Amino acid sequence: MNIVITGSTKGIGYGMAREFLKRGHNIMISSRRTEAVALAVTDLGNEFPDCTVLGQPCDVAEFDQVEALWDAAESGFSQVDIWINNAGRDGMKVPFFALPKDDYMQTVKTNIVGLLHCNRVVIPKLYQQGGGMIWNMEGFGSNGMTRRGVSVYGATKCALRYFTKSVAEELAGTPVKMCYLSPGIVVTDMLVPPPDQRGEGWEQVKKIMNTLADTVETVTPFLVEGILAADRNGAAVRWLTRPKIAWRFISSRFLKRDIFTPLGL
């Protein structure tokens, strides 16, 4: 299969790219920074010489750049089977009233405007080629949960779930499938704030993360296998389910997890 992943030069996106390549599929790498894209393409191409690894810089908040990403994928692969909207931004971990305007606007542009641009470009293209799947990446806030310091990010992810559900209904009966992808809580530079933004509540947050969070290497194989197995519109691949959350909290009484120390965080 031929797969496009936005925001795939690091973190979950890069981890999923590696997992798809391990299974013999072709990948289009993308992110805003040209240098990061070139490096990821080189590294993955060297690691998986029997697969096709392409790259195209793209700021998803810019409609013409999303169009260029599709064109590059179509030109390189002839068709796109799976498009994953993984690009996302969190921003500063401070109360909303303390957020600089540029910070929250960039989060909205990436997480909402970028989501809309990608789906608006890709849905008609997939329909024209005869079908395909789009996966929208959920995050904290998708289920309505709230937490201090992530009000804007959480709001964008809550909107993402509504949008995905609504468009999946619009696409019912068509060859284009709209799906949900949820990695749970994954330790990446998006999740862990820099030391100067951790504040007095960081230790409590860290304790919860040690109970519920996982590494990229743990989560991405599950996500990729779920994507490859899915065959229906509205499918959802979610790592951190309610039963798993309940078990994690129960087992934390006698089994202490520490995912930060091995990662040097």
Image: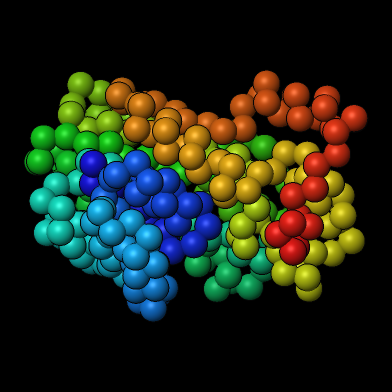
Q: At which x and y percent is residue 31?
A: 39, 66
Q: Nearer the viewer, residue 219 or 153?
A: 219
Residue appearing at x 78%, y 39% in the figure:
211
Left or right of 44: which side holds 66? left
Q: At which x and y percent is residue 181?
A: 46, 37
Residue appearing at x 28%, y 59% in the figure:
49
Left or right of 131: which side holds 172? right
Residue that protrudes farthest toward the bottom in the picture: 35
* Residue 261 placement: quadrant: bottom right
Q: Is residue 28 visible?
A: no
* Residue 140 placement: quadrant: top right
Residue appearing at x 33%, y 56% in the figure:
48
Image vertical order of residue 192 relative to residue 79, above or below: below
Left or right of 84: which side holds 261? right
Q: At which x and y percent is residue 65?
A: 26, 67
Image vertical order of residue 28 relative to residue 212, above or below: below
Total marks drawn? 0
Residue appearing at x 56%, y 47% in the figure:
217
